[in-house]
Image (cartoon, grey):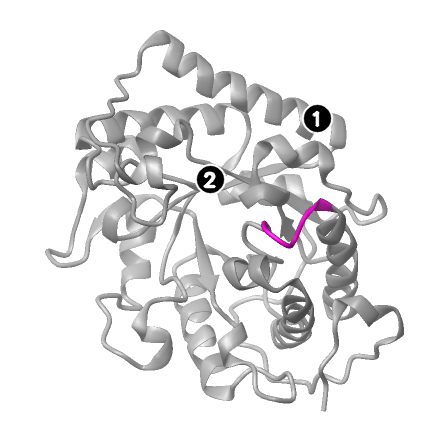
Amino acid sequence: MRLFSLLSLATAVALSPVVASAQTSAPFEAISPEAQVAKMGAGINVIGGYDAWWDGGETKFSLSDFDKIRAAGFSTVRIPLFTFKHLDKDGHLDADYFKRIDQVVDAALANGLTVILDEHDFETCAKDADACATSLSNVWYELSAHFKAAPNSVIFELLNEPNGQVDDKIWNSWLVDLLAIVRETNPERNVIIGPTHWNSRNDLPLLQLPENDRHIIVTFHYYDPFHFTHQGASWADPETQKLSGIRWQGKPEEVAAINADFDKVAEWSKASNRPIFLGEFGAYDKFGKLEDRALWTRTVSESAHKHGFATAYWYWDGGFGVYDAEKKVWVRPILDALIPK
């Protein structure tokens, strides 16, 4: 049995079995995080863990969609994984689940895409930090061992949007231990880590990364102004749920606000010597006008790349989507905002 908690990793010994890695097209070669970010360019979040495909159900996603993603001009895919529910009682990931992860990674790599494996159980962690500590440690023993021979275009993201019970003190302690787990089998693979409060840029100064680990990319998420990007969203706060008709029209002060926010992130990046990945940004379509959403998306994307950040848009399909999975066509204004012609 192997059920370790991050609370006791100082004395833990990895007992994870050696699992065959996904079939890969090239051996691992170390790459600096700066070079990796430059290579990542514009990306997209796709085949999230809530998709029925992960449990063998019906889905609108096809592995051939990675070809469409690459052909459209994207360089990176971020795969949000809900791994906790696939852990058995001994802390190992189910073999069938690994097969599905391998299929996704193989299809993305075959299309020349960088693949980010993002552990996305942030809501579970926010509510129960103790249980999260155990699950996270087991997941990263499993994933890091499984993908230890994968090419450098496979990147690990330790945890999406730490928040709630996972405050900065807990997260700064955990990330050191999680990195130690990954480094046992992947000493030079680049790892993505973000700050607390849902990967808020405002929490970047609270992030404490080990100075001796230079294979780290720092992420943040951006949905400002929130009352525009999330108007009518059922999961937002009660006030935002009731909002509608909020416009974003690219006024000078609106554009300046985004640039000022990214200036601060870039300043932190330079001072900390850590490259930046904007791992999520997008505007919900329930009440947001398509032309406003496209303009906001273009402004954020262009500003991010001008500041030297890699990006991944949220999301492939659905309410934020850049792709209409029913009609099997791109939502052209959003795609053109992300990948200008």
Residue 15: image quadrant is: bottom right
Q: x%, y% of residue 111?
A: 38, 60
**198 w.r.t. 119: above or below:** above
Residue 131 location (% of width, % of height): 64, 71
Is 165 magenta? The answer is: yes
Give the magenta-colored segment's residue range. 163-168
- The vertical placement of 8 against 35, above or below, is below
Q: Sequence-wise, which precedes: disc 1 or disc 2?
A: 1
| Residue hosting label 1 | 270
Determine the residue positioned at 26% across, 31% down.
293
Mark 1: amino acid: Lys
Q: Split into 4 quadrants, where in the image is the N terminus?
A: bottom right
Could you tell me residue 165's position as x and y percent?
64, 54
Looking at this rendering, what residue extends furthest in the left direction? 327
Determine the residue located farthest toward the bottom in the rendered image. 1
Q: Which residue is mark 2?
A: 311
- How many residues crowd around disc 2 within 10 Å: few (fewer than 14), some, or many (20 or more)? many
For image coordinates 58% across by 42% down, the residue present is: 197
Q: How many marks?
A: 2
Quadrant including the C terminus: top left
Q: Is residue 4 left or right of residue 128?
A: right
Badge 1 element: helix
- Regarding residue 75, the answer to whether it shows in the image is yes
